[in-house]
Amino acid sequence: MIAPGTVIRFLRTVFYMMLALVSIAALIGIGMFFVALQDLPRVPDPLSRIIETPPTEIYAATGERIMVIGGREAVPLSKVSTQFIQAMLATEDHRFWEHHGVDKLRTLKAFWVTLFEPGRIEGASTVTQQLSKNLFFSFRRSYMRKFRELLVALQIEAQYSKREILEAYINQIPMGVGAHGIEQASRTFFRKPAIELTLAESALLAGLPKSPTRYNPYLHYDRAKERQRVVLSRMVAVGYITRAQAESASRDALNLRPSPSGARTGSYFLDMVVKSLEERYGPEVIYHGGLKVTTTLDPQLQTWAVESLQEGLARLERMLGVYEQAEYGRFGEVVRPQGALVAVETNSGAIKAMVGGRSYVETEYNRAIQNNRLPGSGFKPFLYYTAFERLGMNPATVFVDRPVTIPVVGAQDWTPSNFGLKHEGPMIVKRALVKSVNSIAAQLVERTGPEEVIRTARRCGIESHLEPVYSLALGTSGVSPLEMASSFATFANGGIRHEPFWIWRVEDALGRVLEEHIISGERTLDASIVYQLVDLMRGVVDEGTGSVIRRLGFDLPAAGKTGTTDGYYDTWFTGFTPTLSTSVWAGYDQGEGLRDTQGMGITGGRGAAPIWANFMIKATQGEPPREFAIPPDIRFETVNAITGRAATESTLNTMRVALREGQSIERDTLDYEIPFHWETGTFDLAP
Amino acid sequence: MRKLCINFGTMDWSEPRDFKEWARRAFSLRPLVLVLLIFVVIILELRFDWLEQALGSYLVTTNKKRPESGAIWEIGHRRITARQTLEQLITDRQSSQREARRANNFTQIASNLPPGQGVMLSSEHFRELYLSLPQAIASKIVSPLELLRLFSNGSWVRTYLENEDYGFKIYLLNSENRVLRELRISSDLLHQIRRVELALEGTLEDMPTFENRIYTADRFFKAIESLPEEDLRSVVPQPERLLGMPGRIVRVGISDEAVSGYIELGFEIDDGTRRRVILVRAREWAVWSLRSLLEEKAHEVDRVSRSQGNET
């Protein structure tokens, strides 16, 4: 039997301990209050003042707005659907109109759950507390941070009306996909102002603040719908709507705007624009200053560029057998080929379209500008121009396609081989480029020297590091598709070089001009020699390694050059019409060559050229055929493609060549003495 | 009634001896009232949020003394920095633009334009700047015929001048900002222009073009005073330049040649040790107005002196 005194003493001890605990808690509370008070942030007045930030708007050349960076525009409560406000309050804080910053009952419940139901966390933050957190505090969890947040919430409640608080809240709340505030979210997800939101749409948006990523309707539609149902049931529970209305709204189809990240026009291009703006003005001006930037992008061409590249890569995947591998359940392991496309206006240098990869959502790495890949034979035009200019050659000059070995000082001899490992004997220079004969390119670079070829490439705008070695002529130094497109534009433009550019004009929010682009061309190449080169490159498209373009139906005057590297790691086609120069690259990002299911290598003509053709057919539709401008000193002759002599009616293998003033076939053509074996019908091509 | 009176002085503070006494004490009126009071306070707090309101109101009073810290203030500060940066950029650009629009010659533009920066001028303004140059120097920049051709076909609308290390780069632009013609004024040429605009050693008599049209400074400036305000700048476009010269203007000469709507004025300056002449191009029509005033004054002086002579 316990003595009553013991029990009483025990109860008394418990009472005093509780009293002491309460006192200590009160003292701690008071202490924390004064500690927290020391660096409690100041609350702005009015609240909406600092929420508003002017956006930086990026426009296409056509005037269409293609991107908005930053920028928050506060809308008054009267411009927001009542159903959204009800949905949001029912979900986030249904006692909002009653409390003074903290919902004590909910907080106690949350405390209870946190203490006695391990693994479960229940939020109890009111709208005011959330506003306090979003405006002033980081997302690092700590008791002091939570306490400060609470104090600021109490101040906000004491300082502002409920409507002002609600207005500030709905205008700053993060809703995902880069949207802050209900107006932006409404326009982002449903392409309409917040005042026009329906019950179903309101419920979907009101469910997002809990976890904008987890309930992102673009990525997790079912989860978002589930969350919408939770919001609707909360609205029923609070009494805002009836069950029938909730069920009807739940069944309503959501007319979501196409995914902004997927459909955003020219994402790779926009990345480049933003990066260059950051370099010029600094990130603060871009994200908080509010600029109006007019770019060179043509949204229609951009759409076609994306389509063409994606269709081309899908076709390439079929050739590579990627889908067969996928059927065996190995798709996740399969590395898919990538590609890039850049289109440049020839007479200005304006970039009209740019695609840096198969999907911006999958990878933001911009292969159009960051990827320096070997151009292979795509580099030969620089060599041929150099040869015409430095060696005084003409397109009818004869060279012999034969095995060649070029001694290299201090290194192993260079012995390039032709694509088909065959040699055809004598042929004119035009035929050599049209057929992309490596042995003749090697002989040319041996005569010009690689330094001269580099000089020509630089004059055309190639800025990447180029190794001064003989193999440079066969494209063994990496370049980007943008460099290729813009340097070939110099050929298309008769030797006048335009720096590629992507921003036309930058203005501040008030329309005051900060910069505007001036289209200034510089003659870097001789017009007549360029024309001879263009004539050679037309042969590539009409009857050479790029003739697939004609077979695919592109029939406007065009010139270009294919490129394929050893092992089929890179496939290129860069070509141009008099108005548009486009470069296409396709290949794997790393370590693998492109080989079809039969094991055959995929060349620039098979891999990249069809993408080019597909794009250019769309990009030039409706354009009348326009010839390349012919300089006055150019005349045409038809010659024997083997001997380079004037063709007669009986000549079988003929080619039309462009000759400059002072060039004649008879005088310039070398008379080769090559032993011919009548028994085998072949030339003796031994070096 | 006595029991309701809470008198702590008469409270029994001794330890209760048994449960009965403990319960009697625990459930007596005083503790019950106390507990009730505590409950009432708690319920009222739950209902009316007095504590929150009191804290909130207190915090409002301390608001102005607290720091502008936290995410939204940082964004605000960044926004202010961004606006200031932008304003600075715009102001610089606009001031260069303003200076260039006011400039009457290339050297003025060059002196106001920082290296690497450019200004946009109208084609008319460029033409005026071009015409203000001596013909020999102007033709080194571009031939007047070429300029005339560009001007007459209507495509040349604007001119962009860029200050570079080696001088000026000039782009004559069409409405699409496409360069129609690119010109250069080398630093040597700019130096020549400056020299022309500087003083020439000697007196007005050394220059035959001013013969019979040399006036005392006093007479010249008296005549100028009678000109309307808008004509003054057309006669002396850059008074600052003359003001900046060491010495005193003693005589002014008016050239007898008009070139492209301009007439040259020569200001003879005496600095005590030597005499120099500064050439300034003035608008032809304004010079004619000035000359008629100068001649009137001359007649008046003659008339006055003649009448004075008659009297004596």
Image (cartoon, coloured by chain):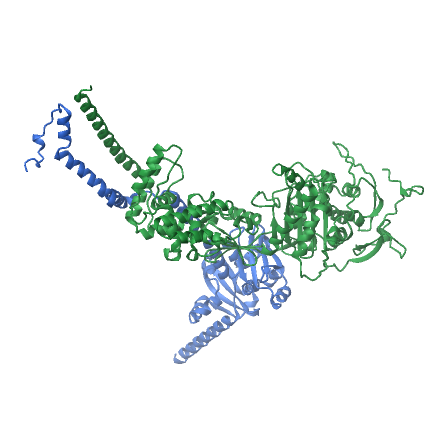
What percent of the width, then of the height, locates residue A28? 27, 33
Determine whether, in the image, residue B88 is placed left or right of residue A584: left
**Residue shown at 40%/40% (left/top)?**
A138
Residue A357 in percent (x, y) is at 61, 45
Work out which quarter of the rendered image holds the C terminus of chain A and state it.
top right
User: Does residue A445 sit above or below A535 in this rendering?
Assistant: above
Q: Quadrant of the N terminus of chain A?
A: top left
Q: Which chain is represented by green in the image?
A: A
Q: Nearer the viewer, residue B301 or A648?
A: A648
**Which residue ends up furthest to the right in the rendered image?**
A679
Outermost top residue:
A1
Front one among A643 and A28: A28
For residue A24, side relative to residue A188 (left or right): left
Chain shaded blue? B
Depth check: A200 or A630 in front?
A: A200
Residue at left 42%, top 76%? B305
User: Is residue A180 visible to the viewer in this orientation of the structure?
Assistant: no
Vertical placement of B62 versus A510: above or below? above
**In which quadrant of the rendered view does residue A659 lie?**
bottom right
Q: Is residue B254 left or right of residue A541?
A: left
Q: Position of residue A354 (x, y in %)?
A: 61, 50
Viewer-nearest residue: A643 or A328: A328
Residue A641 seen in render: yes
